[in-house]
Amino acid sequence: MEYSNKYLHIGEEIDPDDYVICKYKISTDLGMDKAAAAIAAEQSTGTWTGISTLNEKIFELYSGRVTAIEGDIATIAYPKEDFSLDIGGIPQVLSVISGNLFGLDALKGVRLEDVTFPKSMLNDFLGPRFGSEGLREVLKRPAKPLVGTIVKPKIGLSPKETANYIYEAGMGGLTNGKDDETLSNQKFCPMEDRVVAVAEAIDRVKEETGHIMIHAINVSTDGHKIVEVAEKVQELGASEIMVDVITCGFAAVQALREDPSIKLPIHVHRTMHGAITKNKDLGVSMNVFAKLVRMCGGDALHIGTFGVGKMTGSATEDFANQRACIGDDVPYKTMLPVCSGGMHPGLVEKLVEIAGTNIQIQAGGGVAGHPGGVRKGAMALVQAVDAAYEKIPAETYRKTHTELDEALTKWGSA
Ligand code: CAP
Ligand code: MG
């Protein structure tokens, strides 16, 4: 298969305000030049053969340009004119930067590692409404990590049982609760009843202790219904909404953010991302997804546990995700990084040591699995976070904090 080397512009300086710039990791027997040119061609003006309808003018204005090849990484810049944000939006962006290229038979593997957008494109998006600061303001928790739980079991509890879980978690000092990603509107836990019951539980915690907590209701659903469902749960007293960005699409986050009637923070879950991000030679990096979620307006996003929890991930990768959430290279509020997946009190010290304190630490099993139940599980997680925040070793803190001690006895430490 022949690909025109006219797509190669190695070493050419390009203005980052005029191009969407992508970095692809490529594995190929074609040779990097040909492979990169093949991607630039397929994703812009070319196809597998020369075509009579492509003229010099179109080629010059709209072709992707391979501007660098370093080892197995190729940089390709797509002219901003190739994109259509008014109609097309993020789905069209993804079709260009991460579309057909993955299927090209001539390439063994391609992974989109990074992307940067011109300012004019970034300005078309609102970014988070609340972001880290806004969430911290709502929760009156300016500096310590937020401490959350996912109601477990994932499915099966009734609205009353769910609300009781959240009440106990709140009484134990957690700031955040959330539905699990597979919970929606099943018969055993109708969404409307759950929203009302959980809102009452959160109110009760506040009345009894003054402690503020929010809970994210999973509004993930078909595209044509998501805003309506979010409006309904908001009306019924929800304090936050959750959306699964990979299954619902980035446009779902954007729709929730941009609809003037929705005023709630948006917690963004990433279930299914592993199918796309886990293979280091094929797919899209989580860093790219994090950038898109922040553009679309997520307030908090699961980014991984820096290699300490149950899900695949590493500190290096999750640092990149964290940077995408909080970096100041985009015109948005920062988005709160959520560290979740197999977390428990014994992992908190290590996590905070690596990731710092501007995170939400979240545990389902690591709260509900405490030998003393949910309230004590919540207390143990809060104690672990307090200790890490104060830089007191958990081994010292456990001596004066029974709940933490019990958790460390059950689960050990990292
Ligand atoms: C965690 C969790 C989250 C994962 C998702 C779960 O529960 O609810 O969905 O954190 O992974 O179902 O596994 P546990 P990630 O605390 O009981 O593990 O955050 O990496 O997207
Ligand atoms: Mg879950």
Image (spheres, rainbow, N blue to C red):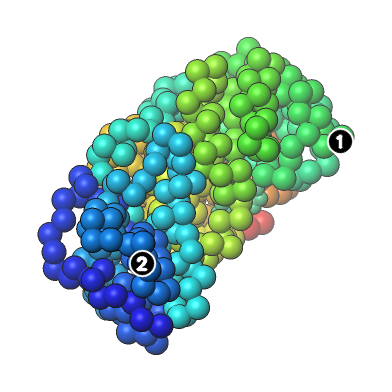
Q: How far across and how far down the image is residue 160, in percent?
A: 81, 27
Asked where in the image residue 184 lies, by quadrant, the reply is top right
Q: Residue at x 26, y 37 (%)?
A: 120
Question: In the image as oriented, which residue stretches furthest toward the top?
Answer: 207
Of residues 247 and 3, the one drawn nearer to the viewer in this rendering: 3
Question: Does mark 2 have its CB less than 8 Å from ligand 1?
Answer: no
Q: Is residue 262 above or below residue 345?
A: above
Q: Is residue 32 visible?
A: yes
- Label 1 sits on a secondary structure element that is loop
With 215 as the anchor, is 65 left or right in this view? left
Q: How many marks?
A: 2
How crowded pointer 1 is (Cα within 10 Å; few <14, some 14-19, many 20+) is rated as few
Q: Where is mark 2, residue-wise? A: 52
Type of the residue with mark 1: Phe
Type of the residue with mark 2: Ser
With 25 as the anchor, is 328 left or right in this view? left
Q: How far across and how far down the image is residue 166, in percent?
A: 69, 30
Q: How far across and how far down the image is residue 61, in percent?
A: 24, 53
Q: Residue at x 68, y 38 (%)?
A: 222
Q: Where is mark 1, residue-wise? A: 188
Q: Is residue 54 above or below residue 203?
A: below
Question: In the image as oriented, which residue stretches furthest toward the front?
Answer: 52
Q: Earlier in the sequence, mark 2 or mark 1?
A: 2
Q: Is residue 72 visible?
A: no
- Label 2 sits on a secondary structure element that is loop
Asked where in the image residue 14 lies, by quadrant, the reply is bottom left
Asked where in the image residue 212 lies, by quadrant, the reply is top right
Q: How far across and how far down the image is residue 294, in percent?
A: 41, 40
Question: In the image as oriented, which residue stretches furthest toward the right?
Answer: 187
How crowded pointer 2 is (Cα within 10 Å; few <14, some 14-19, many 20+) is rated as few
- Tell me the mark number nearer the camera, choosing from 2 and 1: 2
